[in-house]
Image (tube, grey):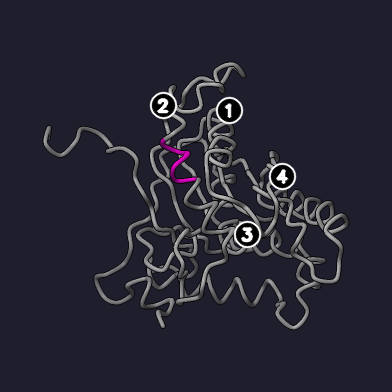
Amino acid sequence: MTTFDDAAGSGAGTALPPLPEDWERCLAVAAHPDDIEYGTASAVARWTARGKQVTYLLATRGEAGIDGLHPDEAGPLREAEERAGAREVGVDTVEFLDHRDGGIEYGPALRRDIVRAIRRHRPEVVVSGAYTVRMVAGVVNQADHRVVGLAALDAARDAGNRWIFPELADEGLEPWGGVRFVCFAGAERPTHGVDVTGEPLERGIASLAAHAEYTKGLGAQGFEPRPFLTWSARQAGHALDVEAAVLFDVHRLAFDGPPPWEQ
């Protein structure tokens, strides 16, 4: 099984580079309420504290996430917890797409919904969760996570092509080809990291703690936000030679500056 240290490539001379922060707008795309809070929210707290604009886009309302609560009750509850968690890290805009929790399908409909959000918010960076079968530490990834992560990657490129989903132009949404890279949290082989030592981690812990009813609904599988996030951030910190970090697998959509053959 791959461990945090293995995935991070820790050791002398092997520290990962920091994620570039020379951008202003980010769109975080996730399948369910609480997905962003399992680490990424700490990075979001760092970014918003530095004046960056971060928007959340959730594919579902997480209505299938609490075994002891009917979806009609769980959905509004989890939406409210997500909005509260977002506020803890400086995010004011949280949007929901209303795809079915547990049954999200990869295809044009999902990609179009994400493209619509990208064209509206015009992010330079898109953040999502790993779309691979395995995540960090070899843990098997959930189906909705895989679908949404891959759709977010594809939509980031689709958003700049006016002939893909041309109907969005009728909504006044012109193409946006300004996404520079897409970052995946929880990846088995991360490439970059974000230092979340101190206040960003504290805000991230508060963000996950806002999902109290969901966490309680997990029963024996639930856990306290502080020890879990502190442990995972410190493990990831080894890869960046810092106290606490969040790691991402970064996919670049364009070169920074002239392409190599023109340099």
Q: Which mark is residue 161?
A: 2
179 or 141, nearer to the observer: 141
Labels 3 and 1: the sequence-earlier one: 3
Distance CA(mark 4)–CA(mark 3): 16 Å
The stretch in magenta equals: 152-157
Residue at 50% in and 73% down? 234
Residue at 38% in and 66% down? 240
Residue at 80% in and 71% down? 67
Residue to which mark 3 is pinned = 35
Q: Residues within 10 Å of mark 1 (few under 14, many from 20)?
A: some
Distance CA(mark 3)–CA(mark 2): 29 Å
153 or 99, nearer to the observer: 99
Residue to which mark 4 is pinned = 98
Secondary structure of the residue carrying numbered label 1:
helix
Say if mark 1 contacts mark 2, CB within 8 Å: no
Residue at 79% in and 67% down? 66
Residue to which mark 1 is pinned = 120
